[in-house]
Amino acid sequence: MPIMNQTFEIQGFDEAVIIVRSPEPHLACWRDVGGWMLQHQAEVDMRLLRGWGLPQASGREWRLGHRNGSVGHVRLMQLDKAGPQADMRADDQCWDSGGIFDLNVRVRDVAAQSAALHALHWHGASPPIRWDFGGLIVKEWLTRGPDNVRLALIERIEPPLPEADQPVGFGPVFNSSQIVRDMDAALSFYCDVLGFERAVSFQTGSLPSEANVMGLPPGLASQASLDLHIVHPKGLVKGSIELVSVNGAGGLDLSDTARLPNFGMALLRHPVRGLRVFAGHLARQGWPLAMPLTRVRLAPHGEVDLLAVRAPEGAWLEFYEAAA
């Protein structure tokens, strides 16, 4: 008999799923402004929707990606007969916790890209802000569009990216943020339960009394500070998850509404080697599955086995492996 593989290996997330009311405004963002390609469109596999607890639902999906990117994709999903749907983080502020907050992409010229998105009715928490991101000087624009989807457009200032790494349009999605109230619980889940490593950790101290990337009122910004940690299975900033607590802002807890099938930033998907071993590991850790191990069709991968868990403050994470 073959020896059973007793190990598992998680990769950084390779796609983010957005549940939309209509795909057209999102396609205009990613394809027309970002320069991405539409790689796939089809019906959503009914087995996935049943695994989500939506046995009556059906849907269509559109998968987009950067022309030169093998990871960092976006999958749009439009559902029918899914029951009541509202925004994941309805009427929120940047300092409100719960669910998935944004997707990060690199851009060559944040001013030009923000102007293009303004024309499509995307709006920022503030104008593009130059700030020190743990030793990197960046210009960042945190913007919100249809279905309350947020993107962080990031232009590297110092040290500059090599010319070959400066994207035309949007680069691949390389990071996704979550605003959390309990940083200890979040880090325990990602680092102790999932085994992720910290790639970046820093604290800002009191914010200056001026415009800031989170859109805090300048007159109140000095009462707040940011505690920020980027985690990834191998300690990279590529398919990584950024945990941010906005201390002193007194934000709302929106984790209860950050649930499928609500509109907006729905989930992140991670490839895994040894998925069944990983499922056993989660059971030993006492961490419940939000979706049991299920076989589904997931283009372009074909048949995959997939399971899901929820992070402490509501973010839905899926883990998949090609079916044997």
Image (cartoon, rainbow, N blue to C red):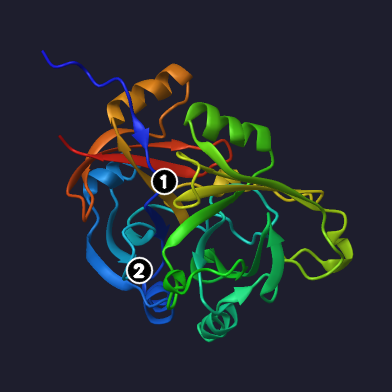
Q: Which residue is mark 2?
A: 66
Judged from this view, the residue extending furthest toward the top is 1
Say which quarter of the image contains residue 170. bottom left
- The circle drawn on residue 226 is none
Rendered residue at 68%/52% (across/down): 96
Q: Position of residue 225 (x, y in %)?
A: 79, 51
Mark 2: which amino acid? His
Is residue 88 at all visible to an observer of this figure? yes
Q: What secondary structure is marked by label 2?
A: loop
Rendered residue at 61%/76% (across/down): 123
Specify whether 165 is left or right of 1.
right
Rendered residue at 39%/52% (across/down): 83
Q: Quadrant of the N terminus?
A: top left
Say which quarter of the image contains residue 133. bottom right
Specify whether 95 is left or right of 6.
right
Q: Position of residue 150 (x, y in %)?
A: 55, 64
- The circle drawn on residue 12 is 1
Judged from this view, the residue extending furthest toward the left is 1
Q: Position of residue 48 (x, y in %)?
A: 27, 45
Specify whether 243 is left or right of 249.
left
Q: Quadrant of the C terminus?
A: top left
The first of marks 1 and 2 along the sequence is 1
Packing grade of label 1 (10 A; few <14, some 14-19, many >=20) is many
In the image, is residue 145 above or below residue 310? Answer: below
Residue 99 versus residue 51: which sits nearer the camera?
99
Rendered residue at 38%/70% (across/down): 22
